Structure formats: structure tokens, C-alpha cells
Image (spheres, rainbow, N blue to C red):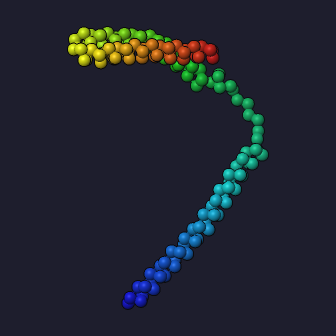
Amino acid sequence: MLKLKQEEKSEIIRESIAKKEYFKRGEKMTIRKKILSILTIPTTLILNLSVVFANPIMDSKLATGTEALLRDITTWLLVLIPILGGLLILFFFIRRSGADELDQKKWNNRITTAIISVIGAVVASSILKIVIAYYN
């Protein structure tokens, strides 16, 4: 019985080796097929070129709608950012007045960060508005 099991094992091993070689040959064939398909696509496209006249994208509904959306968003940002930033800075001043010395340093840092953030956001929104106006 031991000999049968060993023979079965060796047969299984032989079959697996044969299968692996088969897959290696198959992989080479698929690579060749992929290369041929990659080369076939551009040549087909080049040979079947036709001139297509389309409306410019600037007149499309998508472009004009996006432009209007950006214009409205920048207008609202220029109004809301200073208001919300001012309220936030006011809140930080109130919290700083009720804090001890160690916490006052933290609130001073927060106030400075809020001021710089408001200035940066207003400048960024203004630049965006200028760029949009340039393309109009």
C-alpha cells in the first residue's frame, strides 16, 4: 500500500509540473495577444479618422453653469468669511478675558490663527473671483 501512495504522489507531482509548464506557455500567448491588441487599436483609430464639428465647450450648459456657480460661491465667501471670522475672533477674546495666564497664551495663539485664516481665505476667494472675471 505504501508503494501505491508513493506512486500516486509522484503522479500528482508530474501532473502539477505539466500544468505549470502549460500555464507558462499560455501566459506567453496572452502577452502576444495583448501586444497585438494594443497595436491594433491605434491603427484602427488612425485609419478610421473622420472630422467631427462640435460646439465649443465655452457655450455648453456645463461650462456656463459651472462659471455661474463659482461666481456665486466666491461672492458668498467674500461676505461670509469676514463675518464668521469676526464672530470667532470675538468669541476668542471673550474666552481669553476669563482665562488664567497659561490659557491666555493659548487663546492669543488661536486669535492670531483666526486672523491669519480669515485674511488668507479672503485673499484666496478674491483671487478666484479675479481669475473667473478674467475668463469672462
Q: Where's residue 36, x and y in %?
A: 70, 56
Residue 85 position, x and y percent, is 38, 13
The residue located at (54%, 72%) in the rendering is 19
Query: Residue 14 placed where, x, y %?
Result: 52, 79
Tell me if residue 8 can be seen. Answer: yes
Vertical order, 103 against 34 (above or below)? above
Report x, y in % for residue 125: 50, 16
Q: Is residue 74 visible?
A: no
Q: Quadrant of residue 91?
A: top left
Q: Left or right of 121: which side holds 46? A: right
Task: Write the residue at 72% across / 47% down.
Answer: 42
Q: Residue at x 65, y 56 (%)?
A: 34
* Residue displayed at 62% across by 68% down: 25
Report whether 51 appears left or right of 58. right
The N terminus sits in image quarter: bottom left
User: Is 71 above or below relative to 38?
Assistant: above
Query: Could you say which is closer to the camera, residue 61 or residue 28?
Result: 28
Q: Nearer the viewer, residue 67 or 74?
A: 74
Quadrant of the snapshot with the C terminus: top right
Q: In this image, 106 relative to 9: left or right?
A: left
Q: Is 54 in front, or is 38?
A: 38
